Amino acid sequence: MPQLSWYKREEDLTRAALTPYRLLQPVAGLSYGEPDSPNMLIEGDNLDALKALLPYYAGQVKCVYIDPPFNTGQAFEHYDDNVEHSIWLGMMFPRLELLHKLLAEDGTIVVHLDDAELAYAIVIMDEIFGRKNRVSLCTFKQSSVSGPKSINPGVVSISSYLFCYSKNKTKWKSYKSYKARERDSRYSKFIRNRDQEPD
């Protein structure tokens, strides 16, 4: 299988393994709900947090949704969304590797990105999860051509993407969701004598 190369790739491939395990310690002033509840809110670097979760949840997580930095140069308070491309790849690879270890055999991971890093993210997901475990790529309209976009002389993007992988597609199941709706009145019409020639 072809692999994506970037500056310091070999170093980034070992980052997840070299990240030390840290103990998760409850903070009394921030604890809520039932004392024995398995729910957790973890504050800190997400690479450290994922590694700390491995001893408890490896192979047990059914569904993961991540919304990583799109790397489009937008200004965000808590993370840099304008890093050099190889840094972005180096940040994503070890985190996706740990998420793969956390997923159950029939688990699903969904990644939300726009087109800035989409192609590269799919290539590293193919490498970590296996192309055979790619489930789907969904496009959704995130904005409309209005305001500054309406006068942009270049190509305007209004879409974002959700791409979905399973850990093991042979054990993965799609669970359909149904939503009630009113009867469609268009289906109450019919044509009489459809074979008859018009006058």
Image: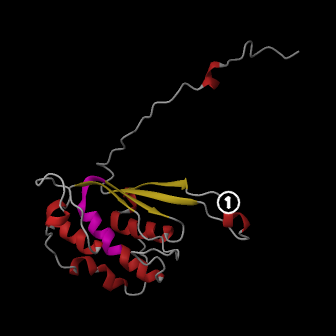
Residue 155 in which image quadrant:
bottom right
**Colouring convention used in this rendered image of the protein:** secondary structure
Q: Which residue is the site of mark 1? A: 146
The residue lying furthest to the right in this view is 199
Q: Is residue 54 magenta?
A: no
Q: Secondary structure at mark 1?
A: loop
**Which region shows up in magenta?**
93-107
Question: Which of these two is toward me, 105 or 61?
Answer: 61
Kind of residue at disc 1: Ser
Q: Looking at the picture, how far across and down is residue 82, in whole percent? A: 49, 79
Q: Looking at the picture, how far across and down is residue 167, in whole percent? A: 30, 57
Where the N terminus falls, by quadrant? bottom left
As drawn, 76 above or below 133: below
Q: Looking at the picture, how far across and down is residue 80, in whole percent? A: 43, 78
Where the C terminus falls, by quadrant? top right
The residue lying furthest to the left in this view is 36
Q: Is residue 12 left or right of residue 163?
A: left
Residue 125 in which image quadrant:
bottom left
Q: How many marks overall?
A: 1
Q: Is residue 92 left or right of residue 23?
A: right
Question: Which of these two is toward me, 27 or 163?
Answer: 27
